Amino acid sequence: MVRFFKELGHYLDVTVHVIKMAFMTIIEYPSNIAGWLISNPLQFIMGFAIIKFVVESFGQINGWTYGQLAFLYGLSVISHALSMIFFVQGWFMGYFVIEGEFDRYLTRPLGVLYQFFFTNINIFGITDLIPGILVFIYGCVKCHVVVSPLFVIQIIIMLVGATFIRGGIYILLGSTSFHTRSAVDFGQYTQEIMDKTTMYPLSMYPESMQFILTYLIPIGWVSFYPVSSLLGVEAKFSGLVIPFVTLAVGFIVMLIAGAYFNFGLRKYESAGN
Amino acid sequence: MLKKYLYVIKTQIIRSMAYEFNVYGNIIMQTIIMITSAYFWRALYKGQTMVGDVDVDSMLTYVIMSSILSVLFITNVERRIQNSVEKGTVATDLMKPINVFGVYFAEDIGNIIALVFQNILPIFIIGSLMIKLPTMANPKDIPLFIISVIESFLINWLVAALFGMIAFTAVNIDALIQVKKHLLRLLSGSIIPIWFFPVGVQKVLEGLPFVYIYQLPLSIYIGKGSSVEYLSQMRIQFIWLVVLSVVFFFVQNKVIRKVMVQGG
């Protein structure tokens, strides 16, 4: 037990240093900071504007009002931002495999997956977080949500779960590179698909797709099911327990992803061979 | 002279064919995106036949053709410029007896030729089977459509190249590439046609080059508007093409001189 806590302390220590280093590296290219500060909020503000235009043209989206859509969109962007901060490296795993970058991690006395994600922590993800929070607050106001401690806890639990689901999916997709040996970056596509399935009500898609996105690739739990139960809109699953289901699903996806990553790592050949 | 560029195109085609998994992966991902978009529009049109003068069938055609055009408009020139500036190979590239930007253009053309078979045909077939056959509204407008697509392609490439040239001063332009990508995706009508936007926003966007990349050829394809409207819009498209070309050649000479000076 003592050893476990000692190790945990060590990991936390390393994490603090790594985050400091991440701050240092982002100031390397000043124009880049400005670029991300514009690019990421711009993307979501425009995405949100488009929802507004669509709602104005069509009245509502599958029975969801504008305020409810803002609530859904905001939470989806927040969990997206969190997954960008901690797990975006999964998108680039292919390059690490091809270039033999895992060699460095394998020689160090820390978990490979931990090093892979945390030594490359992406502070810029914060720029996604801000528009997400703004849209979410706007949605809360429009829906006249009563902010109680229970509500806050539910939101936090749900966001942790949602971030794990997203991160797990990035790891799963990235780990395919161990088998295919290709550096293909599906990040943009993954994001586009996730945007379409988490920022709009899942119920607008056909039954078969909803089934897949609920039980096989659990994207529905990222935002749609928790939000529909919180707001009480066409809730297929409802109750206080829903955010915890998201969390549980997140853990399961993460465990599977971790196992698949370790399985892939065994097939990894370093750059020299 | 042209032979050199043809050789670059050929090499690029072969290079694009190397990774089989990428090809299948891309097709699967793009198909999923296309099909979700189709369901998105179907759900929106539930209970309504015409919104913004367009019915659901035309909108589905719009989605399929937009996916196909987005493959045609893949450019790599920004990243190529960034890499060669970052690694310093731009100096040796400029010494070669062939225009660097010509090489980048030829590489992008080669890539697209490979993609016609790898992506465009599969997307077309899957789209036709799973969504609907994307037939053109007025077949007599085919020449207009083809000309506008060629102009769109060139405008798109010039915008990408101009963004890429920022790398000569900023070195790392990852973020700017993203800015450009989002601007293009949302302001060009590639995801949601701008006729669903408020009139004021539409007016502003019609003044920018982006709508002439996706929305104009797609409008011609689904028959939104009349031939007279198409021609007047294509005139603006052509003006943008000329303006961007002039800016491109001006900036190109400037950056090349800059590199030369740095090199001694």
Image: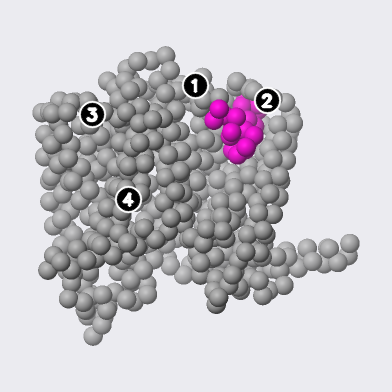
Q: Residue tagged by mark 4?
A: B115
Secondary structure at badge 3 equals: loop
**Outermost bottom residue:** B264
Q: Residue tagged by mark 2?
A: A237
Q: Which residue is at 42% across, 65% downward?
A: A30
The residue stretch that appears in magenta? A208-231
> Taken as a whole, is the magenta stretch helix, strand or loop?
helix
Secondary structure at badge 4 equals: helix
Q: In the picture shown, does residue B159 fall above or below A236?
A: below
> Which of the chains bears the disc numbered 4?
B
Q: Residue tagged by mark 3?
A: B136
User: B211 left or right of A131?
Assistant: left
Q: Residue tagged by mark 1?
A: A62
Q: Quadrant of the N terminus of chain B?
A: bottom left
**Outermost right residue:** A1
**Residues flagged by tags 4 and 2 on a common chain:** no
**Residue A263 horizontal/vertical position (percent):** 67, 58
Q: Nearer the viewer, mark 2 or mark 3?
A: 3
* Residue A164 numbered mark, or none: none
Q: Which residue is at 51% across, 70% downward?
A: A99
> Which of the chains bears the disc numbered 1?
A
Indicate the amino acid at tag 2.
Answer: Phe
The residues tagged by marks 2 and 3 sit, at their Cα atoms, a distance apart of 43 Å
Indicate the amino acid at tag 4.
Answer: Leu
Mark toward the start of the polypeptide (4 vs 3): 4
Neighbour class for label 2 at 10 Å: few (<14), some, many (≥20)? few
Q: Which residue is at 37% across, 33% downward?
A: B127
